[in-house]
Image: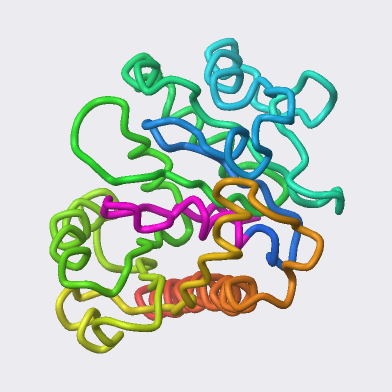
């Protein structure tokens, strides 16, 4: 299946909340992998600290060093259930950002593990920055890399150098896209012109639903029809479509060149 990387320009763009909303509306089995070097947020956020910590990302890093590449959802394994469906799981991230530099050598192997899963993987890579400890290998290996931003001049300004970093990591603009969070602000056309990357979808700002996903405030039972979730469902379809479109273009180009 496919690996998708979600990144942020910083300043609370909402990438983790967006990743969770995408996963909870994703049409196929999916894993949310918390690859943010600043630390994971799902255990303390969505689950409000009520879920025992799985081995998560550090367990994967340790086992890839021993040549073990399978993610386990069994008791005491790497993964935990995101909901009761049995088809949505998550890989908990770091509990301390001071662990990130030590994780740096393991990112290439982690990227291979995530890309080889028998389901789709949404990798929440957090704010894209320079320096050691960044999940650059995960971003580079993804079928599509998506930057989640708010449509404000401040976020667009912060996004510009990070789009350049994405272009360097991925060798070009193919399979790059933006997801906007919020209905107001700069238009998709303005943002695409400024950053040179297409806007794949726009998700409405829905503070009440976002607080359930980010901080476990309120009930999850009636989320399906909320504006955020409807927007995430459409965004997920757009991301998958971008992946399939890029794949068809690549096959067509290779056929012409061949």
Q: Is residue 25 left or right of residue 37?
A: right
As displayed, is residue 2 above or below residue 207?
above
Residue 79 placement (x, y as % from top left): 71, 32
* The quadrant where residue 78 appears: top right
Q: Inspect the magenta stretch and tell me whether residue 221 lies in it.
A: no
Residue reaching furthest to the top: 66
| Residue at (64, 26) in percent of width and height | 69
| Total numbered labels | 0
Q: Inspect the magenta stretch and tell me whether residue 9 lies in it.
A: yes
Residue 41 placement (x, y as % from top left): 52, 37
Residue 153 placement (x, y as % from top left): 16, 72
In this picture, which residue range is highlighted in magenta?
1-22
The quadrant of the image that shows the C terminus is bottom left
Q: Is residue 168 left or right of residue 150?
A: left
| Residue at (35, 75) in percent of width and height | 257
As displayed, is residue 243 above or below residue 190?
above
């Amino acid at each position: 299946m496919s690996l998708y990387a979600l990144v942020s320009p910083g300043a609370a763009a909402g990438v983790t909340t967006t990743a969770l909303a995408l996963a909870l509306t994703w049409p196929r089995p999916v894993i949310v992998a918390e690859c943010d070097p600043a630390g994971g947020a799902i255990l303390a956020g969505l689950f409000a600290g009520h879920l025992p910590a799985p081995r998560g990302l550090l367990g994967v890093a340790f086992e890839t060093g021993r040549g073990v590449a399978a993610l386990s959802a069994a008791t005491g394994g790497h993964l935990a259930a995101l909901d009761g469906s049995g088809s949505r799981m998550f890989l908990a991230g770091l509990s301390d950002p001071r662990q990130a530099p030590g994780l740096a050598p393991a990112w290439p192997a982690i990227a291979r593990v995530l890309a080889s899963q028998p389901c789709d993987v949404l990798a929440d890579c957090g704010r894209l920055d320079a320096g050691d400890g960044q999940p650059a290998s995960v971003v580079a290996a993804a079928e599509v890399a998506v930057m989640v931003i708010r449509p404000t001049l401040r976020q667009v300004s912060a996004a510009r150098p990070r789009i350049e970093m994405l272009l360097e990591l991925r060798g070009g603009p193919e399979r790059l896209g933006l997801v906007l969070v919020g209905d107001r602000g700069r238009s998709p056309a303005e943002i695409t012109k400024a950053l040179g990357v297409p806007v794949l979808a726009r998700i409405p700002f829905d503070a009440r639903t976002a607080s359930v996903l980010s901080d476990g405030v309120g009930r999850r039972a009636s989320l399906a029809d909320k504006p955020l979730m409807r927007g995430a469902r459409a965004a997920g379809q757009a991301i998958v479509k971008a992946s399939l479109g890029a794949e068809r273009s690549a096959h067509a180009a290779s056929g012409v060149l061949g």
